[in-house]
Amino acid sequence: MGEKRESALATIILALVTLAIGVYALAYGLQTMFYFQAKHWASSAPFLREVPQPLPSTAASPVQEKNLSFYGVSFAAPWKGILAQTNGDAHSEVDFRTGPVIIFFNPAGEKDILSSIRDGDLKTYDRYEAVFGSDLFPTNYDLYWAVYNASPASLSPFISRAQVERIGTLLEWKLAFGASEASTIYKVQADGLRGLQFGDPSKDAMIVMRLFDAHNAQYRLLFTSRAGRGTFPQSDINCVLDSLKLTPEVH
């Protein structure tokens, strides 16, 4: 008799455990699965954990070269003496005698991601609309800001499905967009421009800057040096950033 009671009790406990697992899986299964998936992604792509930080310093080096211009954007540089300058349809480059190199990409070639979503495959648009709403994001800058502010740290097995779908989609975009092997992401701002800087010149071989104007145009610059990493400070990049001016025809 005792054995039957124990067997019945064990059956009830097993049924309750099975029910509890089923309820958990139904309520939090997607969240738990994506929580561990994001941890796996971050182990192979550590930049997923990085989110934009304020610049360590906004001080700028003195201007040495003036009146530089590519694609309707003028700027100055803190390095004296131009070794070579090339102008191209896709990108242009200026090399300075002391080693630094600036590559400026043609804004006309930068992808308008929001327009491609709105005007692209209807199923893809419907999916993103279900996650982010009918307006998606006001501008491409807002999209990039949301993407690079997403982090696996924002995930939990116990957040809502709507939250995990939003954060999960942003992390998928972050993986696709990449971060140019940057160790750090900074928030930056210039005259009429705002955006992100990928990389720390004291650590990284390349620094990439993505800037956006009020009209949704994107400007991308790459800083590097023939002398190697750590050969110019953040204040040199700030000098270029502070000097950026859009010509009237760009507006």
Image: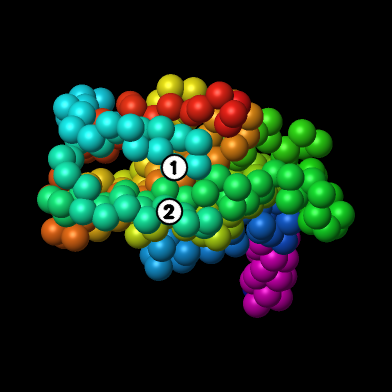
Residue 100 position in % (x across, y down): 21, 51
Callout 2: 10 Å neighbours few (<14), some, many (20+)? few
Q: Are dots 1 and 2 in contact, CB under 8 Å?
A: yes
Mark identifier at residue 70: 1
Callout 1: 10 Å neighbours few (<14), some, many (20+)? some
Residue 135 position in % (x across, y down): 77, 34
Q: Main secondary structure of the magenta part?
A: helix
* 46, 211: nearer the viewer: 211
Residue 185 position in % (x across, y down): 36, 43
Between discs 1 and 2, the one toward the N terminus: 1
Start-end of magenta stretch: 3-21
The span from disc 1 to disc 2 (Cα, nearest Å) is 8 Å
Say above or below: 201 vs 30: above
Q: At x 17% / y 44%, what residue is drawn?
A: 81
- Answer whether residue 234 is magenta in the image: no
Q: At x 60% / y 47%, what residue is drawn?
A: 108
Which amino acid lies under the numbered mark 2 shown in the image of this protein? Asn
Say above or below: 132 vs 244: below
- The quadrant where residue 45 appears: bottom left
* 104, 6: nearer the viewer: 104
Q: At x 14% / y 59%, what residue is drawn?
A: 227
> Which quadrant holds the C terminus?
top right
- Answer whether residue 18 is magenta in the image: yes
Q: Mark 2 points at which residue?
A: 87
